[in-house]
Amino acid sequence: MSNLPRVLVPAADDNRSDDELCPWCGQRISHEKFDEIHKRIEGEERKKNAEFERRLQQRVALDKAQADANAKAQIEKVRKEADTKVRVASEAAKKAAEAAVKPKLDEAEKAKRAAEKQLETIKKSQQALLTQRLQEQRSALEKDKADAVNTERSKMFKEKLKLEEKLQLMQRQLQSKTADELGEGAEINLFEALRDKFPQDEVTRVGKGKEGVDIIHKIMDGHRACGFIVYDSKNRNAWRNEYVSKLRRDQLAAKADHAVLATQVFPAGARQLHIQDGVIVSNPARILVIVEMLRKHMIQMHTLQVSTESRNEKMATLYDFITSDRCTQLLDQIETQTDDMLEIDVKEKKTHDATWQRRGELIRSVQRVRLELSSEIDRIVGEPAADRAAQAT
């Protein structure tokens, strides 16, 4: 309903028909002013109506939210009551089912205990039988082992006797050999060692019965021949100066640069390494090192094309160094370290032999136990089949 102020109608005898009365104060105003006031009043009226509508909508929304909350609370309450009733009914049904099944469970538990007791009795019986069988087999294996050990010891004793007989025979043959035959073995060993150590050179062995040296060593630097070294080997029990004299004559005849005598015995006051009449007398263990020094010296002299006089002077200096304490110390050090390396190799081989022997014993032991296990399984698995066959017949 509009709240516009009432407009007063002007008097009939008033000649100013174009004027209107103000809705609030009743004074005469112009028609334009009246329309302005009237529009302003209508605008305020529309604002009030819009405010009223907004408040009304808020009120409706609040009422709806409250109604939804009340409905939700009511539904939750009903759901909780239903859950409580279902839970109570489920517990009651569970108790009833347990009460009904309990006697059957007790019977099953009793049957299970009886079966376990029976199984334990069978296991004990089988274990006792298995222990008895294993003990019998162990006794039989120990007996077989003792017999095998005794047999092996007998074989080893016989082999030992044979080896001792062979050793005595070899000793008798060695005692009956001549000095020339003993020296020939040393020559062969030195020849093989030189050929293996210096494959780039030409190493030749002079046959028995021929005059001259035992071994001729031609030093090669690529395709160039740099000189010769001659060798002789003596495997004797006593020293004789004629060994050096003969080798010196052979050296001069062969026009060799150096002469080396390999021997285990030396002149009085000398050992391991000695220079006599221009001949190098050396222990066989040090021959290869000495020859390596000589070979390097010969290649350098040939490359530098040194004169004969200078070459002889340098050779004398080299011989002085070979017989010096410094050279002896270095050779001793080389020999000691070589022996240490050989000892390490020997120890390593012994360790490997022991490991391989132990591994073989373990493998054979595992094979025996596996055979016993397979036999026991075959016996256990085969017994029921045999019983069924006996019952069928």
Image: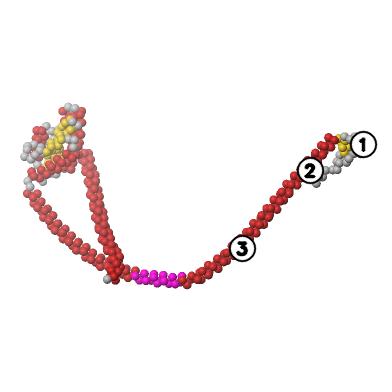
Is residue 195 rendered magenta in the image? no
Residue at the spot of label 3: 81
Residue 199 location (% of width, % of height): 18, 37
SS at mark 1 in the image: loop
Where residue 45 is drawn, which disc sits there? Answer: 2
Quarter-wise, where is residue 137 in the image?
bottom left
Of labels 3 and 1, earlier in sequence is 1
Kind of residue at badge 3: Glu
Q: Nearer the viewer, mark 2 or mark 1?
A: 1
Residue 388 location (% of width, % of height): 30, 69
Disc 3 to disc 1, C-alpha distance: 84 Å
Above or below 93: residue 309: above
Q: Which residues are magenta?
A: 105-122
Toward the front, the furthest residue is: 12
Q: Is residue 116 left or right of residue 384?
A: right
Residue 214 location (% of width, % of height): 10, 39
Kind of residue at badge 2: Glu
Above or below 386: residue 205: above
